[in-house]
Image (cartoon, helix red, strand yellow):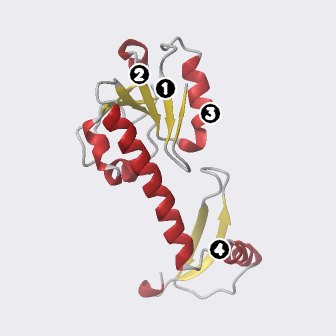
């Protein structure tokens, strides 16, 4: 924001998405308040001001990416779909570009405004979650990893085949039955 000559006015964390930061800026200059100081202190303590932190983070993502790609290459004939599509999942889908050739569709809740649209940069359509029941997927990749357990448990109880596997991409690649 410095480039545009904006100054931070306030910042705070929200509960949504595991504590994302919401910040407000102004052309006027204000003193740094206690909420901003608390966030900056927490970031420094977590070493978010160090390049190595991001390099380690990237390494973990690449490990998950390689593990998923290896799994998919060994299981090319499986019926693979995605479930839940928060906006940040588009970044993952495009970074894990091989997914475009494996996922039949992504299921979203019936009230989603994303239904019947495509994931940007792909030909993957976003469909109503009810399609999971008729498509009988072998594998469901859950893109809302922060809600993985809830989504997996919900769909396991909805009569999907017992053989269906559920994949958690991040923070660490895992396959669940």
**Badge 2 element:** loop
The nearer-to-camera label among 1 and 3 is: 1
Residue position marked by numbered label 2 in the rendering: 138
Q: Quadrant of residue 24?
A: bottom right
The alpha-carbon separation of the residues under discs 1 and 3 comes to 13 Å
**Are discs 1 and 3 less than 8 Å apart at CB?**
no
Q: Position of residue 10 (x, y in %)?
A: 65, 73
* Mark 1 or 4, nearer chain start: 4
Quote the CA–CA distance across marks 2 and 1: 6 Å
At 47% from the left and 41% from the top, the residue drawn is 143
* 155 w.r.t. 20: above or below: above
The residue that label 3 is drawn on is 149
Q: Secondary structure at mark 1?
A: strand
Q: First in sequence: mark 4 or mark 3?
A: 4
Residue annotated with mark 1: 165
Vertical side of 26 occupied by 12: above or below: above
Task: Please provide percent x and percent y for residue 19.
Answer: 65, 56
Q: Which residue is mark 4?
A: 10
Q: Which mark is first along the chain, 3 or 1? A: 3
- Would you say the residues marked 3 and 2 are in contact, meaning their CB atoms lie under 8 Å apart? no
Q: Nearer the viewer, mark 1 or mark 4?
A: 1
Crowding near pointer 3: few (<14 within 10 Å), some, many (20+)? few
């Amino acid at each position: 924001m410095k480039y545009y000559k904006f100054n931070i006015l306030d910042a705070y964390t929200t509960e949504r998405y595991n504590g994302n930061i919401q910040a407000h800026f102004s052309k006027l200059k204000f003193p740094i308040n206690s909420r901003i100081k608390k966030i900056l202190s927490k970031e420094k303590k977590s070493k978010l001001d160090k390049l190595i932190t991001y390099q380690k983070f990237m390494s973990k993502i690449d490990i998950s990416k390689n593990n998923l790609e290896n799994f998919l290459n060994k299981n090319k004939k499986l019926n693979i779909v995605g479930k839940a599509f928060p906006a940040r999942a588009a970044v993952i889908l495009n970074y894990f570009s091989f997914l475009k050739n494996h996922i039949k569709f992504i299921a979203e809740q019936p009230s989603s405004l994303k239904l019947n649209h495509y994931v940007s940069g792909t030909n993957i359509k976003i469909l109503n979650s009810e399609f999971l029941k008729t498509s009988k997927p072998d594998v469901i990749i859950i893109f809302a990893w922060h809600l993985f357990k809830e989504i997996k448990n919900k769909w396991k109880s909805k009569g999907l085949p017992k053989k269906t596997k559920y994949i958690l991409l991040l923070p660490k690649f895992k396959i669940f039955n």
